[in-house]
């Protein structure tokens, strides 16, 4: 390019930059605003849900890829100033919840896992609140990993005040459920002590996001883990979302 006039070089570089940014934006999911309040009742009857696009839960993470008779899923997103709203349609032939304690091996029960990185900054978060991995169980409790205990052991915690959820079966299909969630977003200053205010959501905000489903039909461990976004494996392992927010996708509020 050095033999071209300087002005021409600048124009070409500018075009290349714009093209690169546009390609990057193609991977960001646009989320519409909910202009009316959404009742979290598992019914998803509000007309405003029609303004949101269906997105698939179909990317392999753990286990064999399930048949459509075993599991399939899709989801929608909306937002307002206070919440990110999620509606998921899950088809699962067996709903399984083997642990009564919501902080005991919750990843081996059927659950919806919602990954949130409030400022889309990426980075490690397994033992911090740089990002969150909410495991929303069939009893509608939300578990995650907090900072290690004083003895260095893992600290599995409930963050039920972050996520309001409700699901219902489809009366015409015994294997189909509709799940609604309202999620408060907290920044990385969140701790388990004191009072913390959730972030107010605004148009144009970009958020790290990923969704997945833990599917177990009665085994000691989950049989499938299927997500909304492709994850590049590290040492052959795709189960990285609960560790590294850099594997999340991104959504943009509009």
Image (cartoon, rainbow, N blue to C red):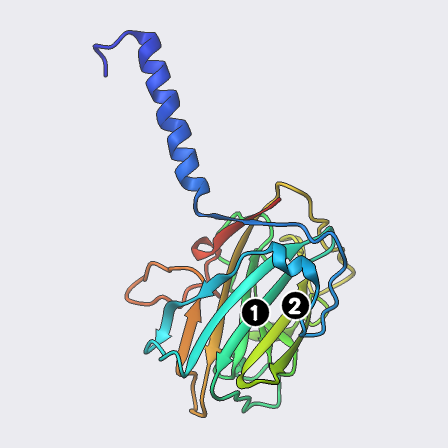
Q: Quadrant of the C terminus?
A: top right
Q: Nearer the viewer, residue 46 or 153?
A: 46
Asked if labels 2 and 1 touch by Cβ distance under 8 angstroms, the answer is yes
Q: Give above or below for 232 relative to 107.
A: above
Res 174 → quadrant: bottom right
Residue 135 image position (x, y, % from top left) = 57, 73
Q: Quadrant of the N terminus?
A: top left
Q: Nearer the viewer, residue 33 or 251?
A: 33
Q: How many callouts does the rendering have?
A: 2
Q: Give above or below for 111 relative to 182.
A: below
The answer, for residue 84, to whether it is visible in the render is no
Q: Nearer the viewer, residue 199 or 50?
A: 50
- 159 sits left or right of 7 in the view: right
Label 2's element?
strand
Q: CA distance from mark 1 to mark 2?
A: 9 Å
- 54 sits left or right of 40 in the view: left
Residue 228 image position (x, y, % from top left) = 45, 63
In primary-sequence order, the first of circles 1 and 2 is 1
Q: At 54% from the left edge and 50% from the top edge, which residue is drawn?
A: 251
**Within-10-Å neighbours for mark 1: few <14, some 14–19, many 20+:** many
Res 146 → quadrant: bottom right
Residue 88, label in figure: 1
The answer, for residue 203, to whether it is visible in the render is yes
Residue 209 image position (x, y, % from top left) = 53, 56
The residue singled out by tag 2 in the image is 181
Q: Give above or below for 84 relative to 58.
A: above
Label 1's element?
strand
């Amino acid at each position: 390019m050095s033999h071209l006039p300087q002005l021409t070089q600048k124009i070409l570089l500018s075009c290349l930059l714009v093209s690169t940014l546009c390609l990057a934006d193609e991977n960001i999911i646009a989320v519409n605003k909910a202009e009316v309040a959404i009742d979290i009742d598992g019914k998803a009857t509000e007309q405003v849900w029609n303004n949101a696009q269906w997105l698939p839960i179909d990317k392999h993470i753990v286990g064999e890829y399930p048949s459509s008779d075993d599991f399939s899923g899709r989801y929608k997103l909306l937002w307002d100033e206070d919440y990110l709203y999620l509606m998921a349609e899950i088809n699962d032939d067996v709903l399984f919840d083997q642990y009564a304690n919501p902080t005991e091996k919750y990843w081996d029960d059927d659950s919806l896992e919602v990954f949130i990185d409030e400022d889309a900054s990426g980075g490690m978060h397994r033992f911090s609140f740089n990002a969150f991995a909410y495991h929303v169980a069939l009893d509608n409790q939300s578990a995650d990993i907090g900072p290690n205990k004083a003895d260095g052991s893992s600290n599995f915690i409930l963050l039920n005040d972050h996520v309001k959820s409700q699901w219902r079966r489809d009366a015409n299909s015994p294997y189909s459920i509709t799940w609604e969630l309202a999620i408060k977003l907290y920044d990385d200053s969140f701790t388990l002590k004191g009072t913390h205010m959730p972030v107010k959501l605004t148009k144009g905000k970009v958020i790290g996001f990923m969704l997945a489903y833990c599917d177990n039909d009665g085994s000691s461990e989950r049989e499938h883990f299927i997500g909304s976004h492709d994850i590049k494996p590290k040492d052959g392992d795709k189960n990285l979302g609960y560790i590294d927010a850099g594997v999340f996708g991104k959504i943009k509020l509009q």
